[in-house]
Image (cartoon, rainbow, N blue to C red):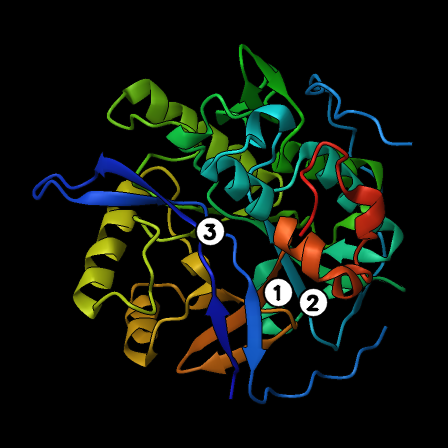
């Protein structure tokens, strides 16, 4: 039996009308969590294998040409998963002394930290693998390396990011590469372009062309395009999604309204699911991946409802790698990488990277 999570959520409420018929108000969440495990869980399968200020956002760079394919071997152990939120480019703007600034410090990482994390993952022998292969138990990795599913939540670039030192949307540069828009220009300082860059530099950092999973809500549009009634915005999203898919990125539902699947009624889950699928049908296309907001697991009936809507691979949050098949749903766990984890999970994260060497000196003191 999977162990339960106790989830502490910091929520910022935004009075944003999201319903076409009822004037429904949406809660704007930035959902990091603290995880406390209780009770038994299955035993893991045996495995086979000087501070400076944060620099200004980096300009875009060309993606390296494809490297020769690497030899892959089958992996027969558990598959780790980690996740992030969009990156902070200007810590002074993000880490102010208000509630929102505390939220950014607790649940986000900076671009400088993410670069250090990627370097640590590479040096510690991790390789990005496809979530579908992880779900099916058919993961392959280069000889001597370990598999990792990377994901990013809330890739929507919400309105509350404005003026707080984060990018405003994902966009394609003139060469068709995925970049992030910051101010009036494009930058590499966000999850997608930095992962693309790391894989180009180290081909063994990716197996089978995998990069990661991008989880999106719908109540403020997609990927930073907030007005999806605009044909030009829809065209930009479609072109972006095509490039993401072509370069190893998968897209998951994070529910339409970032709802709490452990508490909302079946009727509310059904309405939310219908809204997400209606919004994304012509823009993203079908996906079988769903990432629980807050890591909050639905009950059996909610899980079955999501399964019947096509979401047969569902992700929660935990501090131990896990893959469980329940009622036709593959459930996989992910670790949160954020300020909370930096403060309280140093030893657990050492297998991935050294917290002391990646923490941005501009970050508020860890507590």
In the rendered view, does 140 fall on the left or right side of 122?
A: left
Work out whether 23 lies above or below 329.
above
- Asked whether the viewer can see residue 204, the reply is no
**Secondary structure of the residue carrying numbered label 2:** loop
Percent across and percent down for residue 343 are 70, 55
Give the camera-side residue of 239 and 125.
125
- Asked whether the viewer can see residue 195, the reply is yes
Give the quadrant of residue 265: bottom left
Residue pointed to by mark 2: 139
Percent across and percent down for residue 199 are 76, 41
Q: Earlier in the sequence, mark 2 or mark 3?
A: 3
Identified at 52% across, 53% down, the residue is: 32
Q: Looking at the rendered structure, which numbered label has been put on residue 187? A: none
Work out whether 207 lies above or below 136.
above
Residue pointed to by mark 3: 31
Residue pointed to by mark 1: 133
Q: Earlier in the sequence, mark 1 or mark 2?
A: 1
Q: Residues within 10 Å of mark 3 (few under 14, many from 20)?
A: many
Give the camera-side residue of 229 and 334.
334
What is the distance, in whole Å, between disc 3 and disc 1 at their CAs? 27 Å
In the rendered view, does 322 fall on the left or right side of 127?
A: left
Q: Residues within 10 Å of mark 2 (few under 14, many from 20)?
A: many
Q: Earlier in the sequence, mark 3 or mark 1?
A: 3
Percent across and percent down for residue 231 are 29, 21
**Secondary structure of the residue carrying numbered label 3:** loop
Give the camera-side residue of 84 and 249.
84
């Amino acid at each position: 039996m999977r162990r339960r999570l106790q989830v502490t959520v910091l929520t910022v409420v935004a009075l944003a009308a999201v319903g076409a018929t009822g004037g429904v108000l949406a809660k704007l969440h930035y959902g990091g969590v603290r995880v406390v495990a209780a009770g038994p869980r299955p035993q893991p399968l045996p495995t086979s294998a000087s501070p400076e200020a944060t620099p200004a956002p980096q300009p875009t760079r060309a993606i390296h040409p494809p490297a020769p394919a690497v030899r892959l071997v089958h992996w027969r152990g558990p598959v780790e998963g980690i996740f992030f939120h969009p990156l902070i480019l200007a810590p002074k703007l993000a880490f102010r002394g208000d509630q929102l600034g505390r939220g950014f410090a607790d649940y986000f990482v900076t671009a400088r930290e993410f670069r250090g994390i990627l370097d640590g993952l590479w040096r510690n022998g991790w390789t990005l693998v496809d979530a579908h292969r992880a779900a099916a138990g058919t993961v392959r990795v280069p000889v001597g390396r370990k598999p990792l599913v990377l994901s990013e939540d809330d890739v929507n670039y919400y309105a509350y990011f404005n003026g707080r030192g984060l990018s405003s949307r994902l966009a394609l540069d003139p060469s068709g590469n995925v970049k992030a828009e910051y101010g009036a220009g494009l930058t590499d300082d966000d999850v997608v372009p930095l992962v693309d860059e790391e894989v180009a530099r180290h081909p063994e950092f990716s197996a089978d062309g995998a990069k990661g999973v991008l989880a999106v809500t719908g109540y403020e549009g997609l990927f930073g395009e907030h007005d999806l009634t605009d044909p030009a915005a829809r065209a930009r999203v479609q072109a972006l999604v095509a490039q993401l898919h072509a370069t190893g990125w998968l897209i998951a539902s994070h529910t339409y309204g970032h709802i709490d699947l452990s508490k909302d009624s079946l009727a509310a889950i059904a309405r939310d699911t219908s809204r997400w699928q209606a919004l994304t049908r012509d823009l993203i296309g079908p996906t079988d991946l769903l990432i629980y907001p807050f890591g909050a697991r639905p009950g059996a009936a909610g899980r079955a409802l999501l399964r019947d809507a096509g979401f047969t691979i569902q992700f929660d949050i935990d501090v131990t790698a896990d893959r469980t098949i329940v009622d036709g749903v593959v459930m996989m766990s992910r670790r949160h990488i954020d300020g909370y984890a930096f403060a309280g999970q140093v030893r657990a994260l050492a297998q991935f990277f050294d917290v002391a060497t990646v923490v941005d000196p501009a970050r508020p003191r860890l507590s």
